[in-house]
Amino acid sequence: MKISPVHPRRWAVAATPVLLVLLGTLVSSAQIDLTGYWAFRVKDGGVNFFQLQQTGDNVASVPSAGRGGGRGGTLAGTLRDGKLHLVTTFNTPAPAPAAPAGQSPAPPPARRETVYDGVVENANRIAVTMQSTSRDPLTGTFERVTREEAFPVRIPLPELRDVPDNGLARTPPMGWNSWNKFQDVFDDATVRQMADAMASTGMSKAGYTYIVVDEGWTSGRDANGNIVGNGKFPNMKALAGYVHSKGLKIGIYSSPGPQSCSGKMGGGYQGSYGHEEQDARTFAEWGYDYLKYDWCSAGSVYGSTREEERGAYQKMGEALLSSGRPIVYSLCQYGAADVWKWGAKTGGNLWRTTSDIADRWDSMERIGFAQIDIAGYAQPGHWNDPDMLEVGNGGMTADEYRTHMSLWCLLSAPLMAGNDLRTMTEETKSILMNPDAIAIDQDREPKPVERLSQQGKSEVLVRPIGGNAFAVGLFNRGDQPAEIGFRWDALKFDTGLYGFRRLQAQDLWQHEPVQVSGDTYTATVPKHGVVLLRVSIASGRGEAFQASQPAAGAGPAPLTAEQDHQRLMDLLHITSLRPGADQRNPQGPNGVNFDESKANPYPKLPDPLVLNDGKKVKTAKVWWQQRRPEIVELFDREIYGRVPKDLPKVKWEVANTTSGTNGDVPIITKQLLGHVDNSAYPQITVDIQLTLTTPANAAGPVPVMLLLGGGAPPAGRTGAPPAAVGGPGRGPAGPSAQQLILAKGWGYASLSTSSIQADNGAGLTQGIIGLANKGQPRKLDDWGALRAWAWGASRALDYFESDKSVDARHVGVAGHSRWGKAAVIAMAYDQRFAIVYDSSSGEGGTKLHRRNWGELVENIAGRGEYHWMAGNFLRYAGPLHWNDLPVDSHELVALCAPRPVFIGAGRPIATGDGWADPKGMFLAAVGAGPVYKLLGKKDLGTTEFPPGETALIDGDVAYRQHGGGHTDLPNWPTFLTFAGRYMKAPREPNPPR
Ligand code: GLA
């Protein structure tokens, strides 16, 4: 009797018990033909499919039918007397076992063989024991299945489109994943213990947040098609609840294919194929915060083209978005089809760029150093993922693990620990929890790492990092200790080129300062090791760059930010400040708030149209003569600080003029230096760096947008024209802001704010603030860096007034993030500016100080950011509270009236551009409305917070949220439409201001 290969999905369900008995007695092995489709199932271990062909006693698998990521191998053997004996020969060698610490190269791969011995129960079911050289015997069953079950047909993929950014993972995700240590041999209890350990070891404090359950948790689907956990993971929802109770987030794992990659028997666990939306809803309902989505068997249903892979990932990306829960989306297809070019379009927050890492030097080294060329594709919300960490798993030396960690941090890679957190040595902890290395990884405005030099096996990698600093990694890939060095002046500090600056450097693994002297730095780096430095500009004088050092005299007071901050607290008689919002640990005691119901503890704002003496402002005259000066005084005294009287003059010099093109527009670019007269204190030199670009064939003076920026080296994104100093933040590929401006027939200028004033507390006795104070520290109402940058913007405008190519009555100012703050301050204080684009300026910019959302007063009063503000501002994070501020940010906007203001930010959802509080910025725009109306202008037109992408640009105060996270680029087209009402290129008559 020949049994047809097409059988019901589960014979046990379809066949009645009577039939079973019949089959059991009637079918003898001699009559059975195993030809057909079979599933090998292991309890709690997944499933693997075979297509078998029987000829006489001989049974073999049909070769092309292997599944499970192509690792299945080919089966061959016999069926005799009801006994099945099959042996697998593998197409690919088994992965080699880990080499002992420090040993390399890896030993040759072990021979692998898998033997299946089965006892035929009936024509549809065989009890099987699987023995393999690499693991303990497993018992399971061969069950006959349909062709469709074994080889599902391709379900059409959605049309390709760009999935909107979910706003998550603004810095590379940090957490733990089960795979590297446990593969699929772990359970619910293991995961809970890992969450416990994450909290108790300090890992969570260091920033590690996600506990990710990798392959091994599913059994299959219930009658309704819902994915379910297996015996080791009986209640995935309860597990999520437990992990959340530890203040952590939890991740889960699935595949766009029918099965995942590699269950115990070489097949895989249940995947999401054909159930994408249902699974996304399930994961959301269970409370999962992260999905790793692993290609695995998807290759058996889809083609391996970019379109197919993108479509398959888009399908789940869309499903996750519509699940309504913020879920970080981790793509895992091993870097195929240049995923870094399109992963973000599928909604991906991170994408694997390589095949799997192994706990061996050669694997980690090969992967890590291959990432540098694609580093420019990583950006907030969308990260290259060179795979999880192996630190602490025992296959590498401590030096090698430090290299691993240093590389991953320089690459802005996700930091997913892959070791057993319960049993970490102190050394492992010191590597995984090095706060300085993590700070590089988690830089909020990441720039790509670059290779500074490569000589034989020695490589120097550099990356500009926040605080006007550089991270420098000296890597020795060789097998002997090596001397590795670099020139200090290879670090292109924008300020370093102009006048004398001293550098300071810290060794981030030795945790001690290194001496900055001479032209170069050289260190002996151990075999496979690294020296990781943070180099920044110090206060005071030093030996580096001595050539350009001015004449002797008493130098500026050398205070660290910490010392200076303490000095201000002492002056204010404050012993402690409230801590800022903590975004790394949102569930912690100071966790950042993204809950609208808690966001407005002080909904009543100071009234911009009530004088200090309580009288109402009813006329424009009273506004201009009394109320506006009152508000300016309050901002001066309490918030941004006062610009000193009698500041030295600035003499502008055109350092050079070049012609070129941007896109296809011919341009003329002038590099300008604004020399600040330092004859009263020659120890400090301030040369303001500015570039001005105007269209070469302009018919007359053009409107100009002045772009404020830090002046870091241009980010190395492919396709983008090189940015001048300053300029907007990074955004998706496409025309740059500068090109959009040129398209209007206008010019643009870029101002390097750090050439005016360094962006850190240690620099306050330097720069223009230090020069005005002759190197002494600030008084409590002295200006901070933001006000100084805004002052510099005014000096740039002075220059424009003297340049015939510029229509100086139509100069706008723009900035993003901290430069958004400076831009709106420049607009508020200098009435010559015609318009402002304030992008994501947040706290210290146009976000209401009274709002409890994202960054708070306390954050910018802390050591890292207090230098932006007046010393007096610290009081509002100490004895006083937000509600004690006599003015709030809506009044900063009001100071710009009646001139047009455009305020923009990313999505307001908790995890998008939340840190900048888009709604708090919106409310400031609303709050300025009465002043605009008093001055005969139009307010925002609504008090309702609009949905994303709604352009409120009909009034003179405008607002729009875009979907791109913390970036200014998506709002440029809307801003320029708005600005076009006020500024025109020379051929068109200019409208009145
Ligand atoms: C693939 C992935 C790994 C892991 C395994 C599970 O190999 O790249 O990170 O998830 O699958 O089988």
Image (cartoon, rainbow, N blue to C red):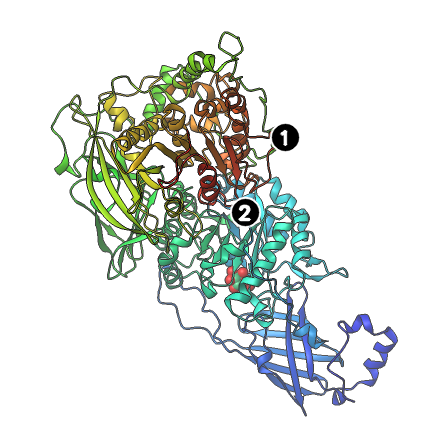
Disc 2 secondary structure class:
strand
Q: Determine which of the numbered discs, if any, sits on residue 210 in the image.
A: 2
User: Quick check: 663 above or below 88?
Assistant: above
Q: Position of residue 330 (x, y in %)?
A: 53, 55
Q: Which residue is mark 1?
A: 597
Q: Position of residue 877 (x, y in %)?
A: 47, 22
Mark 2 nearby-residue class (10 Å; few <14, some 14–19, many ≥20):
many
Nearer to us in this view, 629 or 582: 629
Q: Picture quarter containing residue 828? A: top left
**Residue type, mark 1 in image:** Ser
Mark closer to the chain start, 1 or 2: 2
Residue drawn at x 26%, y 26% is: 768
Classify residue 137 as left or right of residue 538.
right
Nearer to us in this view, 50 or 692: 692
Disc 1 secondary structure class:
helix
Q: Position of residue 194 (x, y in %)?
A: 56, 48
Q: CA distance from mark 1 to mark 2?
A: 26 Å
Q: Position of residue 956 (x, y in %)?
A: 50, 30
**Residue type, mark 2 in image:** Tyr
Q: Looking at mark 1, is its residue's CB closer than 8 Å to ligand 1?
A: no
